[in-house]
Amino acid sequence: MTTTTETFESHSPADGRVIGTYPMMDADEVREVVDRARIASLWWADLGFDERRRRLLRFKGLLARRSRELAELVHAENGKPTDDALLEIILSVEHVNWAALNAEKVLRRRRVKPGLLTINHDARVEYQPLGVVGVIGPWNYPVFTPIGSIAYALAAGNTVVFKPSEYTPAIGQWLIDAIHEVVPEQPVAQLVTGKGATGAALCESGVDKISFTGSTPTGKKVMAACAASLTPVLLECGGKDAVLVDRDADLDKAADAATFGAFSNAGQTCVGVERVYVHQEVYDEFLTLVAEKARALTPGHGPDSSYGPMTMPSQIEVVREHVRDALARGGQAVVGGPESVGEGVVEPIVLAHVPEDSLAVMEETFGPTLVVNPVRDMDEAVDRANAADFGLAASVFTRSRATMERVASRLRVGMVSMNSWVMYAGVSALPWGGVGQSGFGRIHGPDGLREFARSKSTVRERFAIPLTLTSFARHPNTTEIVRRVTSVMHGHGR
Ligand code: NDP
């Protein structure tokens, strides 16, 4: 095996101490890992659903038992408070469990009804593993996000090569080591480490699918790289999620959800709340509630802070630019302002009456800022929410079931939480993914299992019938008979 001598370090965003040193893997090394994964994929696929389920349930058990150890590592390497880390680990445990228990039910070979013309055939569909799945992950939810691909890909019978973010390789290594503990025989899940070039090499390594989670600009590069070899891609990209608050909503509950959705994880959440559209009649009251809750937050470096420092230093400048732009265009700073953007920790910022064409409304800020704007009614709220190019998720708060359903169905997003924030993430059976610039494809649930499988259709003739259509020896009357039958059966449709 070729080995690189170049390495890189991951650091704690809190105090800069080194968490780990990892090889900067080049294209040859990535390809070698993928080659090993391909050999292992034959073994893993042959194990069958039962044995794979047993292994994945053991992995789930290990994750649950050692969640505190992993949470401390997440706190150290990513910077988020330990309790927030635990939350994403608990959700991940649920997903591993669901994928393990449901893979066979969703993917097993099953019979489908043949039509009248093929009544003499037995028709079946099965979902076979793709082979090797390349998973490229971000740093913001370094457990929950990759597990949504890794667990489902493994459950569907694939092996996995995982490229974690350069900011969180130790967490990636922990996950891969844990899988190795429950599957010691073959490298069914392996790590490749490095920076963007290593991710690009994985796209060109001959894997059977890339499951990418990260920013929209990188997602486009991944798709372009995969196009050359027609490698299929699943893209989970950025968001600009909105909360819509109607005049009859429980305002305290809505303000609490919007505040947590905006500021937890320092706003570095793909489905984080970045905009709130509030009915004008309750706008002032809502803004006061949000401002009170935001002022009460205590961000910092400690394990019990409300939220931690920015994980990626370059994002701090983006936050600063969005706040400055919003204020320059006439927006008002209700809590904090440009001075809240520190070197590591960014204090909470609430902006009001921000013009809809500002950066803080149109582009992903990915920091602890929240725009709160008034609207005439929920129709205007939906129009404004849908005006962003992103379409990941949204929340709606109202006491009217009819309004809730109408608004939810009109929002151009992949996921909607009604009278809550992000609760779709906790329902393992629900697919996760976005539309527009937020990407395409789905992880989680049955759709998430099928993303990592290819359907195969088979038909078997059970008995011969005189009406053979697919033969040069077909009787001249055959087509006419079939035409008449088709006309009787379907000709009445208008
Ligand atoms: P990036 O796009 O910067 O990076 C994502 C991953 O892609 C990293 O592992 C990165 O490696 C790798 N990468 C970088 N360049 C390339 C390349 N040319 N080819 C292949 N891979 C490459 O995103 P972040 O890590 O900054 O994550 C934050 C983003 O992720 C936000 O936009 C957020 O909204 C989004 N996200 C989306 C989610 C969703 O479910 N839709 C969930 C979570 C986050 P390296 O880090 O080493 O550069």
Image: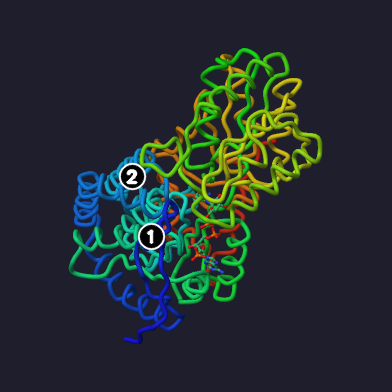
Q: Residue 17, labelled with which disc?
A: 1
Of the pair 322 and 363, the residue shown nearer to us: 322
Q: Residue 89, labelled with which disc?
A: 2
Of the pair 170 and 221, the residue shown nearer to us: 170
Question: Which colour style is shown?
Answer: rainbow
Query: Pointer 1: residues within 10 angstroms few (<14), some, or many (20+)?
Result: few
Give the amino acid type for the residue marked by disc 2 in the picture: Ile
Of the pair 460 and 126, the residue shown nearer to us: 126
Identified at 46% across, 65% down, the residue is 209
- Relative to 419, is 31 on the left or the right? left
Secondary structure at numbered mark 2:
helix
Quarter containing the N terminus = bottom left
- From the viewer's perspective, is residue 442 above or below residue 232? above
Marks 2 and 1: CB-CB under 8 Å?
no
Give the image quarter of residue 494. Answer: top right
The answer, for residue 462, to whether it is visible in the render is no
